Image (cartoon, grey):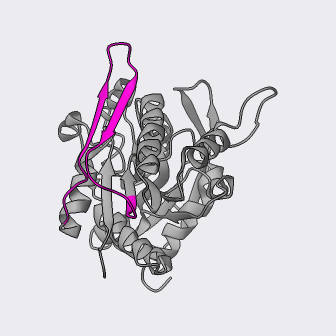
Amino acid sequence: MKIDNLKIFTGRAHPALAKAITNSLQIPLGDMTVQSFPDSETFVKVTDHVRGDDVFIIQPTCNPTNESVMELFIIVDAIKRASAKRITAVLPFFGYARQDRKDQPRVPITAKLVANLLVASGVDRVLTLDLHATQIQGFFDIPCDHLYASPVIYDYLKDKVGENLTVFSPDVGGLKRAQSYATLFNCPLGFIAKRRISAEVVEATSLVGEVEGKDILIVDDMTETAGTLTAAAKILKSKGAKTVRAAVTHAQLTDSAYDRLSEKCLDELIVTDSTPPQERYKDYPITVLSVAPLLTEAILRIHNNMSVTSLFKVKGF
């Protein structure tokens, strides 16, 4: 595939992922200065020539979310004013995705607000991964390519799990995601009913599915406190599960998450590098899978005006 006039830049949110992508493409990472003034204002200066180029900006809007989002807007504006032909925001993790509806009176739909601001800043296209809700694609008034981490996770697990597997959703809302994994592995599907007590405390109340003597795979899009995952793991093991793994695309683990993981309810937590892996991962049963090859292929296909549909397919599905 051609890579003429292709430029890739990154903010400060996840430079390691951007570097992995440019290494795969065998092109240099775009040269740009991003720094903060003493009053915390962000300053950006694009050093490379980008006039007429197809520019991709790698920036997951992860913790610190507000800084990552604002930094992205400023980078886009700088590149737009430097006369880039097209700007694609590559968001391996889309922050504010959980605020995608009015579930209480007088609350915002922040996911839609961020989508509007991305368009207003000058983004022409969005490439993202495992949105919290697929309908968020419709919040963008520009093309949005929505990839899934399931091919990456499947490739890792296909030789590690046998016929004894059952895929579980940790809540009713994630059933569609869990169903896709159950189809991939050709195994039974189950789900757990939960009750949220607070922002950090979740109680699993009941479950539906085959558990006793089974190897369980819990799948979810993201975790911060690991409350949902560990609550699910506890009830599954209490019902006789042999092993319990969890596969989560986006991980932004807090101190309370590590406290819960230290209880060893989960035999393995599988995450991707859509957000920067933390140094503490090595002290826990956490496996990090890279989405750089997936994003690299998507970037090449978008640059060459080719379909990205085949990137969704695993085992012919």
Residue 144 or 42: which is nearer the viewer?
Answer: 42
Image position of 211 (left or right of 41): right
Is 99 rendered above or below residue 198? below
Please report the residue visible at 23 percent of the width from the left and 48 percent of the height from the top.
Answer: 31
Where's residue 283, x and y in %? 18, 36
Where's residue 49, x and y in %? 29, 55
Where's residue 179, x and y in %? 57, 67
Determine if residue 245 is in view: no
Residue 107: name its quadrant: top right
Please report the residue visible at 65 percent of the width from the left and 39 percent of the height from the top.
Answer: 113
Where's residue 282, x and y in %? 18, 40
Image position of 175 (left or right of 42): right
Q: Residue furthest right?
A: 105
In magenta segment, residue 269? no
Q: Which residues are magenta?
A: 27-55
Is 57 rendered above or below residue 52? above
Residue 277: name its quadrant: top left
Q: How many marks?
A: 0
Residue 149 or 64: which is nearer the viewer?
Answer: 64
In magenta segment, residue 52? yes
Determine if residue 29 is in view: yes
Q: Quadrant of the N terminus?
A: bottom left
Residue 263 or 1: which is nearer the viewer?
Answer: 1
Q: Residue furthest top?
A: 39
Residue 154 or 308: which is nearer the viewer?
Answer: 308
Is 56 rendered above or below residue 106? below
Please report the residue visible at 33 percent of the width from the left and 41 percent of the height from the top.
Answer: 11
